[in-house]
Image (cartoon, grey):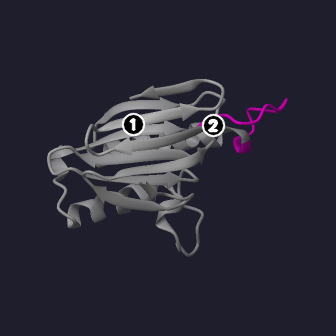
Amino acid sequence: MEMVGIAEYKIVREPQKIMTIGLGSCCGVVLYDEINKIAGLVHILLSNSQNEKMLVNKAKYADTGIVALYEDMKKLGANSRFIRAKLAGGAHMFNFNNSSSSVFTIGEKNVKSCKETLAKLNIPIISEDTLGTCGRTIVFDTRTNKLHVKSVGKGEKLI
């Protein structure tokens, strides 16, 4: 099992599984080529890199992390025509009186930016478990192309 940390991405081949833990407002984006059995997972921390003066870590942001993962997967033999996506995370983790403040909508912004980036790359989203108020751990299985989502207080499901 390959573990992906916050603001990281990794790529695996069948029969490996890939996982990340601690998705609160962060988003886990899985890209997979079900024909060539190559999959990658990026653990997105923030929605976009526009305010970053010197971009050190592309995996930190949705607008750069998804693109970097996509390009690296193609270098390893994934075919862009067969790449699909699954998403999880983007929760609203804290309840404050001023919840409309931009700092408290990080999860929603992350999900929106992930979807916009995937649309620009013409990558269809096959399934998602996003938003809500609970943290998640996800595991992607390259054999079945299923994403196992374990949510705090909500149990487990395959998407």
Horizontal side, residue 68 vs residue 33: left or right: right
Residue 49 visible in the snapshot? no
Residue 67 visible in the snapshot? yes
Badge 1 crowding class, 10 Å Cα cut-off, few under 14, some 14 to 19, many 20 or more, is many
Magenta-colored segment: predominant secondary structure: loop
Horizontal side, residue 39 vs residue 82: left or right: right
Q: Is residue 92 magenta?
A: yes
Quarter assignment of residue 78: bottom left
Badge 2 crowding class, 10 Å Cα cut-off, few under 14, some 14 to 19, many 20 or more, is many
Residue 135: mark: 2
Q: Nearer the viewer, residue 96 or 19?
A: 19
SS assignment at label 1? strand
Label 1 close to label 2 by CB (< 8 Å) = no
Q: Nearer the viewer, residue 6 or 52?
A: 6
Residue at image position (35%, 54%) is 40
**The residue stretch that appears in magenta:** 90-103
Horizontal side, residue 64 vs residue 16: left or right: right
Horizontal side, residue 118 vs residue 9: left or right: left
Residue 147: mark: 1
Query: Quick one: quadrant of the C terminus?
Result: top left
N-terminal of the pair, mark 1 or mark 2, is 2
Residue at image position (37%, 30%) is 127
Quarter assignment of residue 119: top left
- Give amino acid for label 2: Gly
Numbered marks: total = 2
- Give amino acid for label 1: Leu
Alpha-carbon distance for marks 1 and 2?
15 Å
Residue 7: mark: none
Q: Above or below — where is 82 with respect to 125?
A: below
Residue 15 in the image, given as x and y percentages of width and height: 26, 51
Query: Which residue of the protein is positioned furthest toward the top in this rendering?
Result: 154
